[in-house]
Image (cartoon, rainbow, N blue to C red):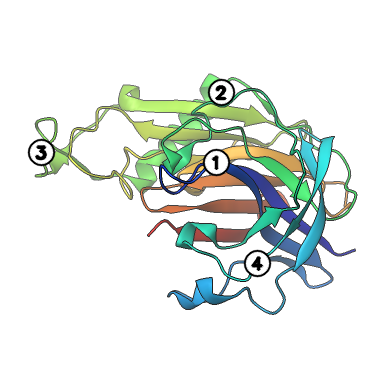
Amino acid sequence: MQVTVGVLEDRPGATTAEAARFVVRALFRKDKEGWTSLEPECTDMSCLASAPADFPASVDWTVIHHGGTRGSVRASTPAAWQLYADVGSQELAAGVTPPTVGERSMEFAGNNGVPIYRPLLAVSAPVGPDADSWKAAPVPAKTADAIKVAFRGLFANVGNCANEGTSEARPVTYQDADIVISGGAASVTGWSVATANLKGYRCDGPWDDTGFAPQTFAISPAGDARYLGEGLQLLDASDFDGNGKSEVVFMITNANRGGYDLRYNDFAGQAVFAFNYH
């Protein structure tokens, strides 16, 4: 079965004169070859000139949240994308009222800088529910300890500035109490995820590629912490391909990089759709 996965996004205007609007960003495709990203394979403005030949021209999307259907929208790919951050976006058909969950907030605002509605998964074909029943959950002490060990393996050496707003980072020593664990979620299969970061960043400028940026880990049923990446925020999960196991989708948020990261087969497989803001 071929299925395309996207995300319904609440998109603020790029300028004060442009109104906010909803779009669907087409992200991933599953076919007999496996999961692939629809991210264009280019690094310059040619990405904006037109969509790749195999990019879906128009899709009737089913919008889902926590395994349940929230509505449907039809969306089509424009003749050209106007901004780097628009790559992959489709415009909703005229008169379509998109479904929303909750109220606008900063929870998934990322680099938008203003409150938005939570992004919702969208699929091109009927899918099963979240087979693994992923839900927000507290992080047990034993799991937190495993994450801190893995975190220290990644960030044995850390630099920070002596004063707020300065730029001369110097080596610092940190304790386990300085590692903040957050964003815990768990599945019925025994897998869980959580994010770790150091508190007290004082340097001027972005904290990408440092221990102060959020670093996400998956924890296996055996208690092993596996590093997934930086700036990953769990969005939702569902059994998109009907194999009885959930695929997990994270939102990517870095200083100049956004997108989505799909994990499957107990985090052994990965597909990434990423873009730069400028």
Q: Position of residue 18 (x, y in %)?
A: 48, 46
Q: CA distance from mark 3 to mark 1?
A: 36 Å
What residue did someone put label 3 on? 166
Q: CA distance from mark 2 to mark 3?
A: 34 Å
Residue at position x 49%, y 28% in the image = 106
Residue type at the position of mark 2: Val
Residue at position x 67%, y 30% in the image = 186
Give the image quarter of residue 250: top right
Kindly state the secondary structure of the residue where label 1 is placed.
loop
Q: CA distance from mark 3 to mark 4?
A: 40 Å
Residue type at the position of mark 3: Thr
Q: CA distance from mark 1 to mark 4?
A: 25 Å
What residue did someone put label 4 on? 38
- Viewed as shown, does residue 198 lie left or right of 273? left
Residue at position x 33%, y 50% in the image = 209
Residue 139 numbered mark, or none: 2
Q: Is residue 60 visible?
A: yes
Task: Check contact, mark 1 vs mark 4: CB within 8 A.
Answer: no
Earlier sequence position, callout 3 versus callout 4? 4
Residue 20 numbered mark, or none: 1
Q: Nearer the viewer, residue 133 or 87?
A: 87
Earlier sequence position, callout 4 versus callout 2? 4
The quadrant of the rendering that contains the C terminus is bottom left
Task: Check contact, mark 2 vs mark 3: CB within 8 A.
Answer: no
Question: Which callout, 2 or 3, points to the residue nearer the camera?
Answer: 3
Task: Check contact, mark 3 vs mark 4: CB within 8 A.
Answer: no
- Viewed as shown, does residue 11 lie left or right of 268? left
Q: Nearer the viewer, residue 220 or 232?
A: 232
